[in-house]
Image (cartoon, rainbow, N blue to C red):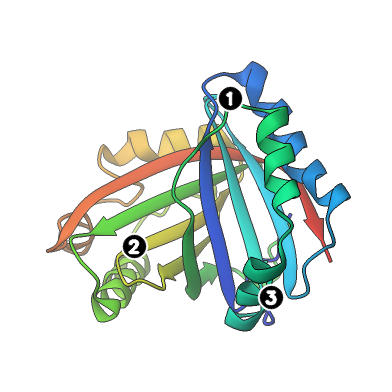
């Protein structure tokens, strides 16, 4: 599984492919990873990680890069045959938007040795670009977490990313199990928090136009 907080990862690419069924899901994931077998591994790509949604309908990608220069070099040199071969092998892919992020803040307990059985991707979108607003919303989540009297014990970590275009936030959250996350949502009825004014501010933040929560299982990763 990826080390989300590794210090040499300064840029993240996250994308989602809609595949529609569990039968196609693993085939698509294997094809995406296998596409690197016929292409040079890009300089500056630290890891490419593939996750499968627990509903069987989506494949998510989380890639760590050393920075902007590495991404620009990859875009200039990525052989078109790599993507063409992938799409020919699995034409069922509905590729959704690729979003570029930078990690802003992480919440975890140092020394925690629990292995995540579920990765929850929380995507938040705002009504326009505003980097200050992105970070203020994330800071509001941390304030709510710190004030929460009864956080669910199944949560392991949360890693909050701000998109470089200023419009989105991604939380890569690790949980012990899928059921632990389901139970946390059911306990409060509105998000994983215990409620109260600080969580109300997070959930009704001005300018937030949509949010989405999807549960995944880590499938495989490739590294340099």
Q: Is residue 114 visible?
A: no
Question: Can you give x and y, in whole percent of width and height, for residue 43 in the image?
Answer: 78, 74
Report helix, strand or loop for mark 2.
Answer: strand
At 61% across and 44% down in the image, what residue appears?
176
In the rendered image, the vertical position of residue 79 relative to residue 104, given as above or below: above
Q: Which residue has dot 1 on it?
A: 92
Asked if disc 3 and disc 1 are in contact, CB closer than 8 Å, the reply is no
Q: Which mark is residue 6?
A: 3
Q: Nearer the viewer, mark 2 or mark 1?
A: 1
Instruction: Indicate left or right for 64 with 198 as reference.
Output: right
Image quadrant where one finds the C terminus: bottom right
Report helix, strand or loop for mark 3.
Answer: loop
Question: Can you give x and y, in whole percent of width and height, for residue 177 in the image?
Answer: 60, 38
Asked if disc 2 and disc 1 are in contact, CB closer than 8 Å, the reply is no
Q: Which mark is residue 168?
A: 2
- Binning the other alpha carbons within 10 Å of mark 2 as few (below 14), some (14 to 19) or many (20 upward) gives many
In the rendered image, the vertical position of residue 54 relative to residue 97, given as above or below: above
- Binning the other alpha carbons within 10 Å of mark 1 as few (below 14), some (14 to 19) or many (20 upward) gives some
Image quadrant where one finds the N terminus: bottom right
Q: Nearer the viewer, residue 77 or 96?
A: 77
When asked about the image quadrant of residue 212, the answer is: top left
In primary-sequence order, the first of circles 3 and 2 is 3
Furthest residue in direction left, as rendered: 206
In primary-sequence order, the first of circles 2 and 1 is 1
At 74% across and 57% down in the image, what residue appears?
79
In primary-sequence order, the first of circles 3 and 1 is 3
Instruction: Indicate left or right for 145 with 74 as reference.
Output: left
At 63% across and 67% down in the image, what residue appears?
75
């Amino acid at each position: 599984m990826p080390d989300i907080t590794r210090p040499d990862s300064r840029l993240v690419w996250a994308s989602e492919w809609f595949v529609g069924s569990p039968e196609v899901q693993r085939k698509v994931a294997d094809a995406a990873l296998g596409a690197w077998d016929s292409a040079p591994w890009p300089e500056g790509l630290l890891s490419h990680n593939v996750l499968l949604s627990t509903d069987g309908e989506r494949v998510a990608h989380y890639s760590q890069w050393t920075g902007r220069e590495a991404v620009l070099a990859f875009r200039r040199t990525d052989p078109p045959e790599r993507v063409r071969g992938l799409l020919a092998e699995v034409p069922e892919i509905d590729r959704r938007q690729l979003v570029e992020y930078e990690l802003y803040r992480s919440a975890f307990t140092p020394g925690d040795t629990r292995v995540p059985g579920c990765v929850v991707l929380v995507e938040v979108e705002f009504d326009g670009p505003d980097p200050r607003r992105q970070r203020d919303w994330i800071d509001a989540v941390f304030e709510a977490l710190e004030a929460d009297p009864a956080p669910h014990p199944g949560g392991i970590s949360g890693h909050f990313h701000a998109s470089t275009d200023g419009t989105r936030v991604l939380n890569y959250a690790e949980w012990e199990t899928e059921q632990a996350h389901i139970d946390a949502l059911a306990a409060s009825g509105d998000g994983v928090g215990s409620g109260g004014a600080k969580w109300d501010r997070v959930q009704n933040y001005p300018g937030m136009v949509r949010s989405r929560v999807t549960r995944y299982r880590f499938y495989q990763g490739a590294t340099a």
